[in-house]
């Protein structure tokens, strides 16, 4: 791995951590708070959130098995994705490499940040080819984006190929594990001690059932977390979100139950799709959704929309021609979907 100083944008590297002026040492033992221009009424909403999310990170640390200093929190993992560009990629000079198809935000934020995005198609069966992916990099490649389980394909990328990329690349490898709670595959967040160039992402939006609170997590080497901290907006995680996330972590047996139910439903739904005459192929999934190749995805999508059922039409996505991405719902939602498809 290159030195972080070489990987980070020069202006970001040069920012002093004090410049964010989030800390006031005089506040630690204070009883009366006259330092932040808050008004003293309307408690508790009158106070700014904890900018370092100390309590939340301590609890997350226990649940995720990662030390608090190795955790960075974003306003959804989408915010972290954008921040990776702002920390590492010099606009109009640096580039990133990603697999295709994959989660669209990696490209969207590359475009916003004016960073070249190099997409390497996955191989047959949406498999990762480390050699082919690494071949797309050059001296200005700062980041390789991997997503496992991958969206929209649903499958986990092979661990050995991911490892080849981590070992063979001297920049940052982001492994987006948004859907990992649905998968038995090894978690790369547990490898951050071994590989200082990994950033593993996770979110409260999927298995944790809290897409509305906007809480994304990045697990990485402490030096990378420090760089992300330099770039973040001071209060990017509001107090309501921090409180709600703590509550979610206390009730994590709910999550285990939801995952079990969804995996069972997914199995039944995928099997039912295989028997549909309008479905040509169902791709294997390690997620709470699956990709299905249909006879005519466009018309089926339109038909379902008219019936008030929203699925994702992936027809225009590279290697996903005629594919729909179907999220697993409740038993009754899934049977309504199947009923509609049987009448198409
Ligand atoms: N990563 C992947 C692979 C996703 O599919 C999504 C959302 N669809 C996200 C990240 C964004 O998650 P968040 O809600 O935490 O921003």
Image (spheres, helix red, strand yellow):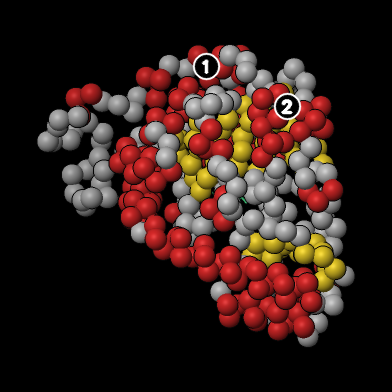
Instruction: Judge by depth and name the residue closer to the eye, 318 or 266.
Output: 266
Q: Is residue 15 above or below residue 39?
A: above
Asked if residue 237 shows in the view, the reply is: no
Residue picked out by circle 2: 95
Measuring from the top left, give residue 79's x and y in whole percent.
54, 41
Measuring from the top left, give residue 248's x and y in whole percent.
38, 56
Measuring from the top left, give residue 33's x and y in whole percent.
17, 35
Residue picked out by circle 1: 13
Query: Is label 1 in a helix, a strand or a loop?
Result: helix
Q: Is residue 174 above or below residue 308?
A: above
Residue in the image at 56% along x and 26% along y? 195
Q: In the picture, residue 57 is in which quadrant?
A: top left
Residue in the image at 77% along x and 25% along y? 137
> Callout 2: few (<14), some (14-19), or many (20+) C-alpha neighbours within 10 Å?
many
Residue farthest to the left, as pictured: 31
Residue in the image at 49% along x and 65% along y? 258
Q: Is residue 282 above or below residue 198?
A: below
Residue in the image at 70% along x and 52% along y? 155
Q: Earlier in the sequence, mark 1 or mark 2?
A: 1
Measuring from the top left, give residue 101's x and y in whole percent.
76, 47
Q: In the picture, residue 200 is in which quadrant?
A: top right
> Callout 1: few (<14), some (14-19), or many (20+) C-alpha neighbours within 10 Å?
some
Tell me the quadrant of the picture where the C terminus can be found. bottom right
Query: Is label 2 in a helix, a strand or a loop?
Result: strand
């Amino acid at each position: 791995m290159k030195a972080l100083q070489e990987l980070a944008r020069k202006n970001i590297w040069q920012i002093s951590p004090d410049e964010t002026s989030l800390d006031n040492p005089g506040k630690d033992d204070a009883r009366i708070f006259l330092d932040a221009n808050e008004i003293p009424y309307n408690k508790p909403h009158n106070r700014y959130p904890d900018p370092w999310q100390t309590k939340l990170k301590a609890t997350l640390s226990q649940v995720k098995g990662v030390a608090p200093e190795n955790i960075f929190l974003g306003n959804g993992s989408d915010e972290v994705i954008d921040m990776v560009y702002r920390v590492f990629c010099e606009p109009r000079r640096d580039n990133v490499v990603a697999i295709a198809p994959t989660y669209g935000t990696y490209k969207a934020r590359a475009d916003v940040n004016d960073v070249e995005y190099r997409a390497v198609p996955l191989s047959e069966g949406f498999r990762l080819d480390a050699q082919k992916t690494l071949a797309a990099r050059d001296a200005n490649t700062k980041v390789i984006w991997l997503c496992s389980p991958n969206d929209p394909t649903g499958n986990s990328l092979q661990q050995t190929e991911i490892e080849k990329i981590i070992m063979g690349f001297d920049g940052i490898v982001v492994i987006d594990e948004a859907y990992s709670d649905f998968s038995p595959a090894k978690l790369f967040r547990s490898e951050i001690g071994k590989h200082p160039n990994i950033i593993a992402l996770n979110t409260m939006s999927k298995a944790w059932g809290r897409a509305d609170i906007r809480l994304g997590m990045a697990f990485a080497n402490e030096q990378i977390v420090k760089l992300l901290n330099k770039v973040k907006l001071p209060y990017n995680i509001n107090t309501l979100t921090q409180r709600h996330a703590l509550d979610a972590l206390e009730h994590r047996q709910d999550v285990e139950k939801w995952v079990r139910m969804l995996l069972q439903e997914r199995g039944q739904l995928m099997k039912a799709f295989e028997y549909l005459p309008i479905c040509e192929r169902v791709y294997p999934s390690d997620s709470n959704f699956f990709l299905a190749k249909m006879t005519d995805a466009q018309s089926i999508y339109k038909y379902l929309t008219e019936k008030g059922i929203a699925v994702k039409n992936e027809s225009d996505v590279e290697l996903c021609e005629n594919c729909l991405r179907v999220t697993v719902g409740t038993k009754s939602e899934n049977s309504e979907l199947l009923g509609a498809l049987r009448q198409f």
